[in-house]
Image: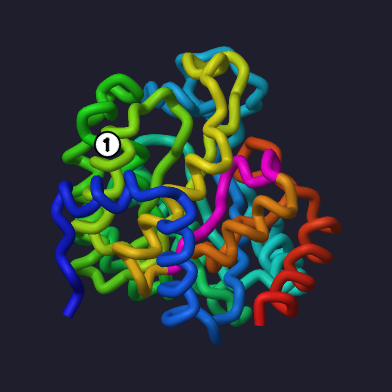
């Protein structure tokens, strides 16, 4: 039976001395994840830009002047070739993401289902991140072979309205409920370093324990010039480490992933994060439209990491 944590429980963990918190998280990580292979997730933007939403961190919003050149859906062959390349580079997951509020039932949605079927046939686990969902589309994605659906809550409910005004936090929870009902694996995390307070981080962690995701992508905000957050102060590594450690304790069996912003941290810092609770990474020189670690360096580092952490 999964333990239920109150907001006060999480606050108490969050405010532990970092050394004590890290040691406890390391013990939990060893207990549940010692024998698990490192998960590598390749992320591809199959539809980029022209998003009508106003997420303050996002380079793909049509409301901001950024470096992004919009494009409609990629050709299926292009996507499949990239999926094959990801498999050759030892990716576990291949995630298809689209800019925009949602992908309604349409020729584009049918194209996505075709892509899912063919990528799944390669032996990759398919993840999709398509914005808001309803029951019908969730079922069709499951039937096509989608393993996991990504839908982040981004931050705490209280801070959410300062980051996004074009939809409500509750709408995120509604989509996650459809994902759960369709028996899709839930991938749900957020973005740190957007100006949120310590209390916002505690509230964010509390909501994640209520959702009980199977995997949690943690993004350190990657600054996108032209967005309202282009002058945000980056989250210090030890603040991120504290969040990873708390998550490992309150979601002991979930896979925690380092996603956006990983390239900002040294290899030594990343190694520490893996010993505390991280069990997966998002790989590729771009994460959607933002820079990431180079593939060559990652292949070397991640192969070495898997050997050293045994």
Residue located at (61% from left, 73% from top): 38
Magenta extent: 255-265
Q: Residue furthest bottom?
A: 35
Q: Is residue 199 magenta?
A: no
Is 25 placed above or below 245 here? below
Q: Would residue 160 appear left or right of 292 to someone viewing this image?
A: left
Whether residue 229 is visible, yes or no, is yes
Is 103 placed above or below 253 here? above
Q: Nearer the viewer, residue 11 or 71?
A: 11
Which residue is the site of mark 1?
156
Which of the 4 image quarters holds residue 250?
bottom left
Q: Is residue 258 magenta?
A: yes
- Number of marks drawn: 1
Residue located at (56% from left, 54% from top): 258
Q: Would residue 100 appear left or right of 116 to someone viewing this image?
A: left
**x, y percent for residue 49:** 54, 30
**x, y percent for residue 263:** 70, 44
Q: Would residue 309 appear left or right of 102 to someone viewing this image?
A: right
Which of the 4 image quarters holds residue 211?
bottom left
Residue located at (58% from left, 75% from top): 124
Quadrant, the C terminus? bottom right
Whether residue 76 is visible, yes or no, is no
Q: Nearer the viewer, residue 309 or 175?
A: 309
Residue located at (28% from left, 29% from top): 160
């Amino acid at each position: 039976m999964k333990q239920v944590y109150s907001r006060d429980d999480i606050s108490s963990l969050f405010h532990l001395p970092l050394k004590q918190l890290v040691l406890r998280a390391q013990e939990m990580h060893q207990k549940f994840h010692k024998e698990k292979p490192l998960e590598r997730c390749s992320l591809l933007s199959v539809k980029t830009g022209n998003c009508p939403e106003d997420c303050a961190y996002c380079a793909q919003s049509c409301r901001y002047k950024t470096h992004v050149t919009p494009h409609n859906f990629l050709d299926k062959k292009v996507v499949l070739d990239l999926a094959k390349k990801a498999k050759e580079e030892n990716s576990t997951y291949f995630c298809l993401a689209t800019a925009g509020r949602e992908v309604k039932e349409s020729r584009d949605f049918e194209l996505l289902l075709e892509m899912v079927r063919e990528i799944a046939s390669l032996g990759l686990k398919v993840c999709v991140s398509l914005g808001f969902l309803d029951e019908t589309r969730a079922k069709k994605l499951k039937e096509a072979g989608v393993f996991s659906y990504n839908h982040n809550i981004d931050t705490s409910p209280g801070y959410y309205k300062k980051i996004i005004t074009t939809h409500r936090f509750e709408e995120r929870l509604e989509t996650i409920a459809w994902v759960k009902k369709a028996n899709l694996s839930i991938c749900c995390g957020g973005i740190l370093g957007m100006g949120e307070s310590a209390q916002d981080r505690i509230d964010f962690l509390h909501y994640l324990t209520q959702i009980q995701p199977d995997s949690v992508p943690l993004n350190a905000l990657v600054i996108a010039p032209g967005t309202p957050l282009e002058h945000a102060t980056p989250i210090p590594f030890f603040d991120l480490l504290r969040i990873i450690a708390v998550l490992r304790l309150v979601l002991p069996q979930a896979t925690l992933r380092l996603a956006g912003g990983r390239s900002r941290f040294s290899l030594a810092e990343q190694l520490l994060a893996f010993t505390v609770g991280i069990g997966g990474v998002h790989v590729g020189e771009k994460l959607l439209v933002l820079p990431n670690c180079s593939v060559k360096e990652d292949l070397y580092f991640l192969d070495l990491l898997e050997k050293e952490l045994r």
